[in-house]
Amino acid sequence: MIGISKLYCGTVEPSDALRYGRHSSSLPPHLLQFSKDKNPVVVWNITRQCNLKCVHCYAHARPKAEEEELSFEEGKRLIDDLARFGVPVLLFSGGEPLVRKDLPELADYAVQKGMRAVISTNGTLIPQETARRLKEIGLSYVGISLDGMEEVNDRFRGVKGAFKMALDGIRNCQEAGIKVGLRFTINTFNVGEIPKIFSLLEEMAIPRVCFYHLVYAGRGTRLVEEDLSHGESRETVDLIMDLTRDLHDRGKPKEVLTVDNHADGPYVYMRLLKENPVRASEVLELLRMNEGNNSGRGIGCISWNGDVHADQFWRHYRFGNIRQRPFSEIWTDLSDPLMKCLKEKKKHVKGRCASCRWLDICGGNFRVRAEAVTGDVWAPDPACYLTDDEIKK
């Protein structure tokens, strides 16, 4: 996760993170990515059921729930373990998490245990009553997925009317006083919608947006050919920086992040090196704190049936199941070769990644993409758009 507004527009300084000791339990949400301990943010896909049919769904979501979903009581025991383990954030996802009627109670329980609870949703199932309930329990954030304006979004979501329902969900969250933001997955079909998303942020006073690079997992594996070229990726990150700066300079700042391609970090730094060398040195320090991709270390995933994964895109590999062993035990058990290597993956990457000058900042980028394209989990990430000259030590 690369904070474009934090880095490029200077809304965060290295001293901001240092002031809190860089411990995840004490850092405010917007600084959590700079923690030193990297206590994992956990994504819990509480259901596989979804009311939409998104073409790029990493979870292969289905219209009906799976029989082996964790029960409410199992969910509470899971939350107890995560709280004891020091997990700072529990992100409820799916499928569509709001199809589970006990989601508010589970989120409430997580907040009571001292964790920040956030929801990743398609936004179509948030009537006013639900928004008020989520506000009452102290939910920290609702991230709503939009992949463009109405025509493009509804085509991606596979259901006509999804866009309008999502906007209603956004308004209901805002009226209830819940912080709400957008999630946008970039590909060749919708990259032209990015300026319109920035306009929507301004029009609806939405404070945050995350632009996700495509990861080849789940139904997203069918979209490999629709991913941006390296040149298009560079142009898109430049566009996002330009639009973020424009809002900032006009006194309408938004929190803007890019996600799932850690080449963005060095790219932002290299642009700043030309424009503002003093700020560039501060950004380099922040990027070193961030450490790049943290799958299997700073982020983990628990599936609807209790399986534990390195992140939400690693469903083809499980480390264990929380019905047999607690997450905390599974996560710290280095007898699994992949878990051990992910904890120190900079030692295992190959090719241009192994000799890259930005390895400490990027963290080797996304191993899932490398495996999907080459069959080798330690091969270079094919979505890295930095040139050979740019990565030379």
Image (tube, rainbow, N blue to C red):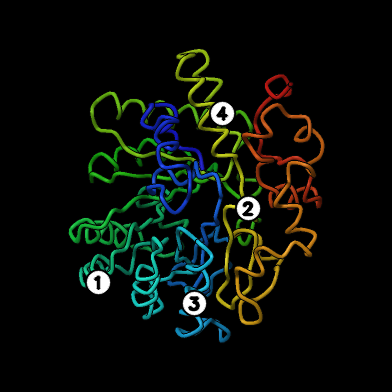
Which of the two labelled residues, at mark 2 and mark 3, occupies the earlier sequence position? 3
Dot placed on the residue nearer the N-terminal end, 1 or 2: 1
Instruction: Assess whether mark 2 and mark 1 are in contact (beta carbons under 8 angstroms).
Output: no
Q: Which residue is mark 1?
A: 133
Left or right, residue 205 beside residue 69 = left
Q: Label 1, label 3: how many angstroms apart (C-alpha)?
A: 25 Å
* Residue designated by label 4: 234
Type of amino acid at the residue the image marks with label 4: Arg
The residue depicted at 49 percent of the width and 14 percent of the height is 277
Q: Find disc 3 in the rendering and name its residue.
A: 63
Q: Earlier in the sequence, mark 1 or mark 3?
A: 3
Q: Which mark is residue 295?
A: 2
Q: Secondary structure at mark 1?
A: helix
User: x, y (%) of residue 151?
Assistant: 38, 52
Residue kind at label 2, given as amino acid type:
Ser
Tell me the crowding category of disc 3: few under 14, some 14 to 19, or many 20 or more residues within 10 angstroms, Cα based: few
Say which element carries label 4. helix
Instruction: Work out how far the residue at label 4 is from the one at label 2, CA to CA, in angstroms.
Output: 24 Å
Quarter of image, res 120: bottom left
Question: In this rendering, which labeled residue sits more in front, label 2 or label 3?
Answer: 2
Q: Are discs 1 and 4 less than 8 Å apart at CB?
A: no
